[in-house]
Image (cartoon, rainbow, N blue to C red):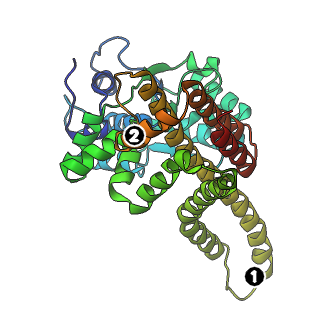
Amino acid sequence: MTPAVTTGVWADVVGQPEAVRVLLEAARAALHFTSGRSAAPGAMTHAWLFTGPPGSGRSVAARSFAAALQCTGDAEEPGCGECSACRTAVAGTHADVRVVVPEGLSISVSEMRSLVQVAARRPTTGRWQVVLIEDADRLTEGAANALLKAVEEPPARTVFLLCAPSDHPDDVSVTIRSRCRVLSLGTPSPAAIADVLHRRDGLDPQTAEWAASVCGGHVGRARRLATDDEARRRRESVLRIPLGLRRFADVFPASDDLVRSAESEAKTVSGTLDEAEREALQTAMGAGGTGKGTASATRGAKGALKDLERRQKSRATRTQRDALDRALVDLAGFYRDVLLAAFGADAPLAHPDKAEDVRAAAGQWTPESALRRLEAVLACREALDMNVKPRIAVEALVTALHTGR
């Protein structure tokens, strides 16, 4: 097995030694190219597609690679993590690294056209003009077409880094995928996640191991569970649902709790940011000003505020859906564990700290009933993807979880 690189920017790429090896080799080749030296053929290319399951670290790997491409420190090990180029690239403030993180449900064509224009420029302070698009699966058809033109005929010093759950046509179009080098990341092992939580975040070994064992291979979720009391409370509330549905009267309170919890999390995440954005926009548009031209500026501010509110609403909707989806993934893991217990399978549980509840459920339900409950969770996730109202989808789900039919 390829040894993991645990220094510089690569230390944050958890449990992906082969991916780090490929990216490090490409960064060396890119450095040779910009300095006029010969490089290994095929090591570096102008467009990359980082794929992998949620929590695998797609965007972290892409940011680390962007930093290595701009690194001015160690020529043999690009991505030192110490130079200004590395630090600003990872932080998203480097002048020649554009990071697109969609706040709403999609990336619009206007946003992508603007980005493509920036990508066509020569780098100002760095070696490359790097465009990093997180959640590239959220590109609209028009945005994907605008990006395709740039990827087909890229400027000599521009690199595109796209992140998506998979390279399936539903996530990234075949035409874009065919022009990218695909780098597939796997789910990090619990041991690798526990190690980074202990080594980098300073958590005690016991807490780190627990969080790593219940996070489903999602590094960010492991950190939240280990450090956030509210995240742990939400998980406990979700995992009480399967055995808590004793009567039909329990269905609607449980549904209400799931939806309200997701709404509360979205409000917490978006509330402070929304207010800060609103105040910044009002100040920029001359709110509170006096004198000539104030009236026309105020009229312009109203239109800009409406546009901001629309984007904030879209962000809140996405945040709520993401929170609800995390709850559904936890539920799916529980029913999967019940099936493992029912058949005596020797496989790690998704929720090892709920082993007693899993055994109790396996004793109450038939395997067929447990499977139908798992299928209902997956069907709810699909319904939410198709824009079914969360309350309707969740009530249908919890009803199915109660009946087992």
Q: Quadrant of the C terminus?
A: top right
Residue 146, position as x, y percentages in the image: 68, 31
For the residue pair 167 and 405, the one nearer the viewer reads as 405
Q: Amino acid at mark 2?
A: His
Q: Is residue 291 above or below residue 130?
A: below
Query: Residue lying furthest top in this view?
Result: 41
Say which residue appears at 46% left-offset and 28% top-offset: 52
> What quarter of the picture does the N terminus occupy?
top left
Front-most of 291 and 388? Answer: 388
Callout in the foreground (2, 1): 2
Q: Closer to the N terminus: mark 2 or mark 1?
A: 1
Q: Position of residue 7 (x, y in %)?
A: 19, 38
Say if residue 108 shows up in the picture.
no
Picture layout, residue 298 above or below residue 247 = below
Which residue was labeled with disc 1? 294
Residue at horizontal 19%, vertical 24%? 3
The residue wearing badge 2 is 351
Figure check: 341 above or below 330 = above
Label 1 crowd bin: few (<14), some (14–19), many (20+), radius 10 Å: some
Q: CA distance from mark 2 to mark 1?
A: 59 Å
Q: Quadrant of residue 297?
A: bottom right
Q: Residue at x 60, y 74 (%)?
A: 279
The answer to which of 108 and 106 lies nearer the viewer is 106
Residue 158 position, x and y percent, is: 48, 31
Q: Nearer the viewer, residue 129 or 110?
A: 110
Assess disc 2: are there few (<14), some (14-19) or many (≥20) residues with their C-alpha within 10 Å of its C-alpha. Answer: many
Q: Residue at x 68, y 38 (%)?
A: 385
